[in-house]
Amino acid sequence: MSKRASLRDFQESLVNRLKAAAGEAAPSARLSFEAGDGRWLLRLDSSGEVLTVPEVSHVPLTKDWFLGVANVRGLLYGVSDFAAFIGGAATARGTENRLLLIGQPHGVNVALLVTRLAGLRNLSELELVDDAARASPWAAQAWRDGGGRIWRELDCGKLLAQRDFLDVALH
């Protein structure tokens, strides 16, 4: 029993430390990921959870970019290929692919399939750029890194409010 209590205490301590670290880093830290040829940033408070890709069950009569549903701890999540949704090629499947559960903070069971995670980015190390010509309704801002690559910030709330994203049925 003491091992169980110790494990619980350790887990609670770890959760509290992660929350504190996220709180300190929230204004400037972003989770970065790649989707096809695009590079994206996601606020830590919008990121929900990151998972390796579980089995996804196909749903017939849906758009190509909607991959189906996945069971995550007993809850069904709608899985969308983000690269394909934004007009790129379908994500090539590989071991680096991840699911971002972006709907959790918004009370929606939505997951994005992304090519790979690229770690945390500190906005103080990036340059804000005017990217209005290529912006989508769900892209909050654009940033340039030291290598000249553009990173767009994904606004999950705006993406989840897009009728095109929510309407996965073929018409």
Image (tube, rainbow, N blue to C red):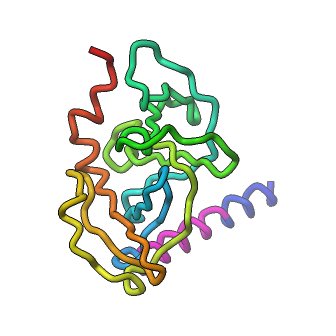
Per the picture, the main secondary structure of the magenta-coloured stretch is helix
**Splitting the image into 4 quarters, where does residue 91 fall?**
top right
Viewer-proximal residue, 148 or 1? 148
Give percent across and percent down for residue 118: 55, 65
Residue drawn at x 27%, y 57% as measured from the top left = 139
Residue 22 among those drawn in magenta: yes
- Say whether residue 72 is left or right of residue 140: right
Give percent across and percent down for residue 19: 48, 69
Q: Where does the magenta region start and end? A: 11-24
Examine the rendered structure and indicate whether residue 124 appears above or below residue 98.
below
Residue drawn at x 33%, y 74% as measured from the top left = 143
Give percent across and percent down for residue 132: 18, 64
**Splitting the image into 4 quarters, where does residue 171 fall?**
top left
Viewer-proximal residue, 147 or 43? 147
Residue drawn at x 49%, y 25% as measured from the top left = 68
Examine the rendered structure and indicate whether residue 55 appears above or below residue 154.
above
